[in-house]
């Protein structure tokens, strides 16, 4: 009988599990060592202001019945003292604390037990639910949840979480706060456009995508609240108003605005209120833009202290996307290989198999780290747009019939493999496509020039980045710096003062500029 060969999409390279329990939830050798009757389990069901805990042995015999626990220091210390007394009385020689993940409410309990030197682990609410339903269908209480947490822990679903250093947590908080501000700013832009179309319908099209960065546009919107006001001022009046405000402009821009004003649709009767809302919302947007820029400087400062800064050598990866990836990933030492990254992000299809039925290529699994997945797909989108190799691969897959979602997943998976080799191996971008890599220091300098970073902070970040770059790549990183030193017209003026310091740091030394025959400007 002829056998059909599995396609590449259905082929799996997973190793066969050595035991049923999850690797991060296994503790059964410890149970065997002390004996099940001498191994204790502390199960905690968390809520906002208080929690409930249960203490049993490995067999499920209750040592302390379900007890309320207030989230304050005296109650936590009293509970830990009581648990230890029960363990001493029942000859419990080893134990485990299983806490159900509940938003951020479980952090107080987890930190308290961890500080008391307990082996503290986390149970996912899905695991609690699946272990509660068979025993107590239709009966969801704190006590039944505690019993379900105990059963989940016994079966290896109380998982050990990797510890993150405070610096990684700070980077993650900064990145997520920036992401929230960007989302709020995008929502403000939508609201501003809605109110702007009510008072000046069609004006935004005169500036296209330059509307949000155009000082001309917002000066005209602020001082000329209607199409009639723009027409009455005329080109000379508009030009005088812009000159008095110190705003540079082109006359063709004013001609475009006046041409629109001559044919503009009538505004709504409530145009005055809409105009006030436009100005108020735009002030809020500008404030958020300043906050985002300040956050991005702090994020860049945190990024250069990690090996993830090496990802800047990939064409299409910028400072923000590299920092977002680093923040959601955490230390690379927590990942055994690239497949651990895609597994945590859930970048693989769900599978349903029963007897002869095998649906191996379902949608992406639902239970995954959604923030990491979103970050990887965001990076994939940038690579498809800005990286020649991935743009060509995406076009090839599109012709082969892949939809946009599958293409993004394929690119994200390849990026994970490349990123793992770079960050774990402390090396810059090397790929069979033989593309010329980007220069890390050049990208950082351009980023800080755009964000108006003070020279002292710029130097600190560049020096830290040099510490992360392999020594064999220092000469290559120095090449664009040498060019910027020789080219008097390129880059910010302050770069001429800091480049020799960076070259010395890279081990290249001072570079002699070629004489141009012109007198020095300074």
Image (tube, grey):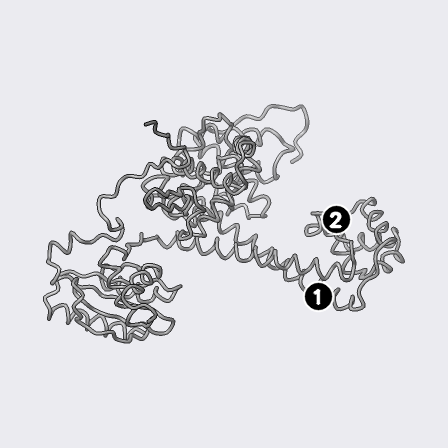
Q: Quadrant of the N terminus?
A: top left
Label 1 Cα neighbours within 10 Å, binned few <14 / some 14-19 / many ≥20: some
**Label number found at residue 237:** none
Relative vertical location of residue 173 with respect to residue 268 in this rendering, above or below: above
Kindly identify the residue that appears in the image at 20 percent across and 64 percent down.
41
Q: Along the horizontal axis of the image, is 53 left or right of 214?
A: left
Kindly identify the residue that appears in the image at 25 percent across and 66 percent down.
43
Label 2 Cα neighbours within 10 Å, binned few <14 / some 14-19 / many ≥20: some
Q: Nearer the viewer, residue 31 or 245?
A: 31
Q: Nearer the viewer, residue 76 or 199?
A: 199
Q: Nearer the viewer, residue 254 or 342?
A: 342
**Label number found at residue 207:** 2
Relative vertical location of residue 387 with respect to residue 237 in this rendering, above or below: above
Q: CA distance from mark 2 to mark 1?
A: 20 Å
Q: Quadrant of the C terminus?
A: top right
Q: Is residue 111 visible?
A: no
The image position of residue 359, as x and y in percent, is 40, 43
**Label number found at residue 277:** 1
The image position of residue 280, as x and y in percent, is 68, 65
Q: Is residue 69 visible?
A: yes
Q: Residue furthest front?
A: 1
Q: Along the polypeptide, which appears first: circle 2 or circle 1?
A: 2
How many circles with numbers are drawn on the protein?
A: 2
The image position of residue 402, as x and y in percent, is 52, 37
Say what secondary structure mark 2 lies in: loop
Relative vertical location of residue 381 with respect to residue 155 in this rendering, above or below: above
Say what secondary structure mark 1 lies in: helix
């Amino acid at each position: 009988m002829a056998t059909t060969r599995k396609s590449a999409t259905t082929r799996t390279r997973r190793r066969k599990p050595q035991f049923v329990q999850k690797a991060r939830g296994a503790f059964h050798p410890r149970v065997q060592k002390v004996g099940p009757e001498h191994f204790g389990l502390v199960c905690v069901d968390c809520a906002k202001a208080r929690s409930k805990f249960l203490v049993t042995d490995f067999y499920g015999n209750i040592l302390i019945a379900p007890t309320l626990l207030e989230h304050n220091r005296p109650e936590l210390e009293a509970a830990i003292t009581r648990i230890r007394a029960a363990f001493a009385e029942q000859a419990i020689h080893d134990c485990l604390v299983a806490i159900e993940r509940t938003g951020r409410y479980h952090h107080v309990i987890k930190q308290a037990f961890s500080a008391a030197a307990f082996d503290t682990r986390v149970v996912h609410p899905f695991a609690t639910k699946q272990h509660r339903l068979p025993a107590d269908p239709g009966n969801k209480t704190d006590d039944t949840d505690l019993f379900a947490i105990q059963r989940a822990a016994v079966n290896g679903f109380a998982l050990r979480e990797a510890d993150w250093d405070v610096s990684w947590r700070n980077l993650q908080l900064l990145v997520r706060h920036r992401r929230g501000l960007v989302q709020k700013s995008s929502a403000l832009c939508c609201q501003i456009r809605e109110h702007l179309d009510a008072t000046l319908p069609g004006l935004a099209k005169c500036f296209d995508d330059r509307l949000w960065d155009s000082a001309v546009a917002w000066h005209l919107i602020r001082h000329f609240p209607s199409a009639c006001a723009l027409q009455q001022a005329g080109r000379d009046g508009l030009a005088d108003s812009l000159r008095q405000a110190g705003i540079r402009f082109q006359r063709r821009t004013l001609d475009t605005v006046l041409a629109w004003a001559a044919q503009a649709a009538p505004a709504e009767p409530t145009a005055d209120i809409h105009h006030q809302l436009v100005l108020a919302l735009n002030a809020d947007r500008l404030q958020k833009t300043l906050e985002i820029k300040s956050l991005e400087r702090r994020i860049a400062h945190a990024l250069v202290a990690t090996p993830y800064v090496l990802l800047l050598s990939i064409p299409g990866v910028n400072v923000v996307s590299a920092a977002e990836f680093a923040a959601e990933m955490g230390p690379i030492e927590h990942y055994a290989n690239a497949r651990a990254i895609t597994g945590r992000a859930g970048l693989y299809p769900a599978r349903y198999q029963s007897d002869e039925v095998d649906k191996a290529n379902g949608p992406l699994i639902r239970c995954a780290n959604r923030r990491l997945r979103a970050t990887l797909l965001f990076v994939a989108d940038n690579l498809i747009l800005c990286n020649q190799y991935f743009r060509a691969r995406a076009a090839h897959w599109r012709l082969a019939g892949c939809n946009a979602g599958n293409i993004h997943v394929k690119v994200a998976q390849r990026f994970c493999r490349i990123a793992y080799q770079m960050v774990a191996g402390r090396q810059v971008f090397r790929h069979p496509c033989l593309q010329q890599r980007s220069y890390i220091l050049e990208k950082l300098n351009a980023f800080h020039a755009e964000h108006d970073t003070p020279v002292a902070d710029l130097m600190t970040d560049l020096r830290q980045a040099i510490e992360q770059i392999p020594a064999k790549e220092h000469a290559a990183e120095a090449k664009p710096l040498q060019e910027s030193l020789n080219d008097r017209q390129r880059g910010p003026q302050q770069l001429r003062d800091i480049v020799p310091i960076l070259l010395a740091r890279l081990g290249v030394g001072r570079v002699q500029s070629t004489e141009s025959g012109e007198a020095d400007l300074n």
